[in-house]
Image (cartoon, rainbow, N blue to C red):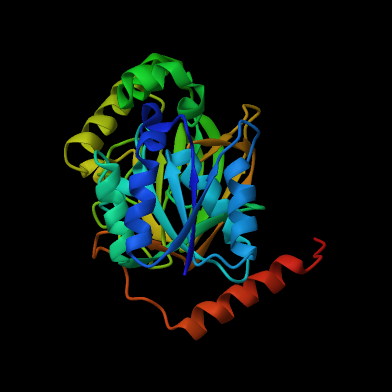
Amino acid sequence: MRARVIYNPSAGREQLTRHMLAILEILENAGYETSTFQTKPEPQSAAHEAKRAALAGFDLIVAAGGDGTVSEVINGVSGLEKRPLIGIIPAGTTNDLARALKIPRADLLEAAHVIARGWTIPMDVGKVNDSYFINIAAGGYLSDVTYEVPVRLKTIFGYLAYLIKGAEKLPQIKPISMRITYDGGVFEGEASMYFVALTESVGGIQNIDPHMLMGDGKFTLLIIKTANLFELVQILSQLIRNGTHINHPKVTYCHTSSVKVENLDEHPLLLNLDGEYGGEGSVEFTNLQQHIQIIGNTSDYATPLPSEVTESTSKLLEEIDSLDLEE
């Protein structure tokens, strides 16, 4: 078996570089013939290498770095018919996917041991146009917080940097007119933001959906139907404390296999995909059920689908994507 470790040399204050030989030894002892790729400064460096490695027949691709590196690797392989197993060594600021999958975030070598044990988890992947996300998509105000925080501030203060930036932007929030269509319902009116989630962790907070079941083919949809500062702080407090925000009267909460968002406002409706800028305006989200096998350390996921079901679903989606439809 062959494994390709794609790592960000600046992640975790360069801890990955210092521990790389030990990480490779752990994977070698687990039966993998290993090699590494150090990401470059140019955009999508990890995504391009992940796609190349997958097409070259690597059995395992390890995303070693922060959430951005993980997201790029997922984007690199999700469009392929044959997708390798994915491992994660978290060395970023928040490490949301690693948190959701119970992968150790304070010990890089222990994270490598989780990969060596090989407990695979069937994960849904969200698709928006030609992009993919594995953790969360967010639209509206505050969706730009993650990519507005300077790298130096994230390095020094970690997760606190996001809180500082978020608190700074709260008084600027205004309502945006939008229409959101989901399984069994439509919301049309003013909201400040919406979230389309595949895991329970966002921005280091694990209570976004207390009833989350990964791999069930459903998104968690949250629509924040207020721009009032007091109500926003109240919702945020409930989210951080105990997850009761889903019962707040200004929150629409449901599970849905697809989401269509239409911007009815002159104000741009910004989109954030796994912490990166994803464009703006009206978008449609499709859930690719159990599209990726990721190595994790939790049993909180849906029953794996039979392989013939996932293969036929992938082929059907590829055929749909290839159609040239006119309205």
Front one among 217 and 264: 217
- Where's residue 174, x and y in %? 48, 23
Visible residue check, residue 226: no
- Where's residue 298, x and y in %? 24, 60
Picture quadrant where residue 37 is located: top right
Front one among 32 and 73: 32
Question: In the visual, does 324 lie left or right of 49?
Answer: right
- Where's residue 62, x and y in %? 45, 53
Give the residue at the far left of this rendering.
242
Q: Tell me the residue at 23%/52% (across/down).
A: 210
Q: Tell me the residue at 65%/56% (across/down).
A: 52
Question: In the visual, does 123 lie left or right of 98?
Answer: right
The image shows a total of numbered marks equal to 0
Q: Tell me the residue at 64%/76% (across/down).
A: 316
- Where's residue 111, x and y in %? 29, 50
Picture quadrant where residue 311 is located: bottom right
In the displayed structure, would residue 44 be above or below residue 230?
A: below
Picture quadrant where residue 218 is located: bottom left
Question: In the visual, does 72 lie left or right of 167?
Answer: right
Visible residue check, residue 48: yes
Q: Tell me the residue at 80%/60% (across/down).
A: 327
